[in-house]
Image (tube, rainbow, N blue to C red):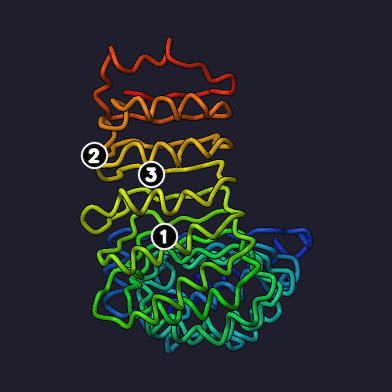
């Protein structure tokens, strides 16, 4: 109870300082605990910890209409945690409805400890935030049931342009709910689904994956897509993903770092994805698998004449690429390159000499270690 009163007093003092700052734009909350405070909280969490909603309401009291960005990292107590001593003045959705100028809500790991309990509250809060432009829900341990719980909220976010759902526990059983989300968010320009297994489960319904592919295909305004550290072990699902990405003709930034594909998929997947993305400016494929058909990949790479950033580091097939005259020839045509990363490769000195083979007038950085 003493800790609760101390926190309440501290946050309310800050609220008094912020109240005159009607032009406040951003609030970032990050909590660190020493081992002693962790031990005390574990001993009696309900009595000793104020809820995160208490803290938000205390510190933002009087300036709710001014704040535009709220960023909360992994916290203790977690987001939407309520305790027996809470002096919470209002339910979360009512509080969030007062944040009329909130443009960005970033909950990075803030739901991880109680995501099942938190998602129904989050859903109601999102329904109140029609003006939201940016939503980050990364590293929260969200699963298919959580995503299903959020389904009613997506249609209430007509202004959303940026969505980060990376680092969660999405498997194939979440494909249908993800499709529903993306079909409602056709104005997205940024989407991050890093470290997902949506296209991985062979046992789940193929129609769900087809729905998801169709939903991705419908993101006609997408500029940036992060699918790094994602997996697809089934040929049909891998092909469906490639076809969906290939149709994103507005895409300028694509991250496929450390993609875990089924055996021998690289030769088909990468050319199938890249052949339609002639507007790409930034391509990252760090850690890619070996390519048997180097000529096929090189011929597609040659069409990406607008590339400014190309990252192919740490790939098991990088040495094979560099030894190929087709690859070198493709690089020669990428005259707009500013950053080129071919690091961790044993460069053949006689077959590949950057200083004499070609020249990039725009190149600012080249990494070849």
Apparent side of residue 94 relative to residue 318 in the rendered image (left or right): right
Picture layout, residue 70 above or below residue 287: below
User: Circle 2 sits on which residue?
Assistant: 316
Residue that lies at the very extreme toward the left in this rendered image: 263
Say if mark 2 contacts mark 1, CB within 8 Å. no
Closest to the observer, 106 or 89:
106
Which tag, 3 or 1, sits closer to the chain's start? 1
Picture layout, residue 348 above or below residue 139: above
Q: Residue 278, percent across and down?
A: 56, 45
Other-residue count near label 2 (Cα within 10 Å), few / some / many at <14 / 14–19 / ≥20 = some
Which tag, 2 or 3, sits closer to the chain's start? 3
Q: Quadrant of the N terminus?
A: bottom left
Say if mark 2 contacts mark 3, CB within 8 Å. no
Other-residue count near label 1 (Cα within 10 Å), few / some / many at <14 / 14–19 / ≥20 = some
Residue 285's disc is 3
Residue 147 placement: quadrant: bottom left
Q: Residue 145, percent across and down?
A: 38, 85
Closest to the observer, 236 or 38:
236
User: Circle 1 sits on which residue?
Assistant: 242
Residue 48 in sight from this viewpoint = no
Closest to the observer, 46 or 78:
78
Q: Residue 19, percent across and down?
A: 74, 65
Mark 3 or 1: the one toward you: 1
Q: Residue 206, percent across and down?
A: 34, 79
Q: Quadrant of the C terminus?
A: top left
Apparent side of residue 229 relative to residue 22 in the rendered image (left or right): left
* Distance of label 3 from label 1 (alpha carbons): 14 Å
Residue depicted at x 28% and y 60% = 35
Q: Judging from the image, what secondary structure is the residue with disc 1 in? A: helix
Q: Judging from the image, what secondary structure is the residue with disc 2 in? A: loop
Residue 293 in sight from this viewpoint = yes
């Amino acid at each position: 109870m003493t800790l609760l009163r101390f926190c309440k007093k501290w946050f309310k003092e800050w609220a008094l300082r912020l109240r005159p700052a009607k032009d406040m734009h951003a609030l970032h909350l990050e909590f660190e605990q020493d081992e002693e405070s962790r031990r005390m909280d574990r001993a009696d969490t309900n009595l000793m910890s104020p809820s995160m909603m208490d803290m938000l309401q205390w510190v933002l009291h009087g300036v709710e209409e001014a704040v535009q960005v709220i960023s909360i990292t992994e916290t203790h107590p977690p987001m939407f945690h309520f305790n027996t001593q809470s002096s919470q003045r209002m339910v979360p959705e009512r509080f969030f409805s007062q944040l009329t100028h909130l443009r960005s809500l970033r909950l990075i790991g803030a739901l991880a400890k109680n995501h099942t309990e938190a998602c129904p509250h989050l859903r109601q809060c999102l329904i109140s935030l029609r003006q939201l432009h940016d939503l980050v829900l990364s590293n929260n341990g969200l699963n298919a049931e959580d995503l299903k719980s959020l389904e009613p909220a997506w249609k209430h976010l007509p202004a959303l342009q940026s969505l980060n759902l990376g680092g969660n526990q999405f498997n194939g059983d979440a494909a249908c709910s993800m499709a529903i989300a993306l079909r409602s968010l056709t104005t997205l320009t940024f989407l991050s689904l890093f470290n997902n297994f949506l296209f991985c489960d062979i046992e789940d319904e193929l129609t769900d994956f087809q729905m998801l592919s169709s939903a991705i295909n419908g993101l006609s305004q997408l500029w940036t897509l992060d699918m790094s550290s994602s997996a697809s072990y089934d040929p049909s699902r891998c092909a469906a993903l490639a076809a969906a990405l290939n149709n994103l003709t507005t895409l300028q930034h694509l991250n496929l770092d450390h993609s875990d594909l089924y055996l021998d998929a690289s030769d088909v997947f990468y050319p199938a994805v890249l052949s339609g993305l002639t507007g790409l400016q930034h391509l990252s494929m760090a850690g890619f698998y070996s390519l048997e058909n180097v000529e096929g990949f090189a011929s597609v790479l040659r069409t990406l004449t607008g590339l400014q950033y190309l990252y192919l580091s740490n790939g098991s097939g990088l040495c094979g690429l560099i030894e190929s005259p087709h690859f070198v020839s493709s690089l020669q045509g990428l005259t707009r390159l500013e950053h080129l990363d071919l690091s961790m490769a044993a460069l053949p000195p006689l077959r590949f000499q950057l200083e004499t083979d070609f020249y990039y007038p725009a190149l600012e950085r080249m990494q070849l270690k």
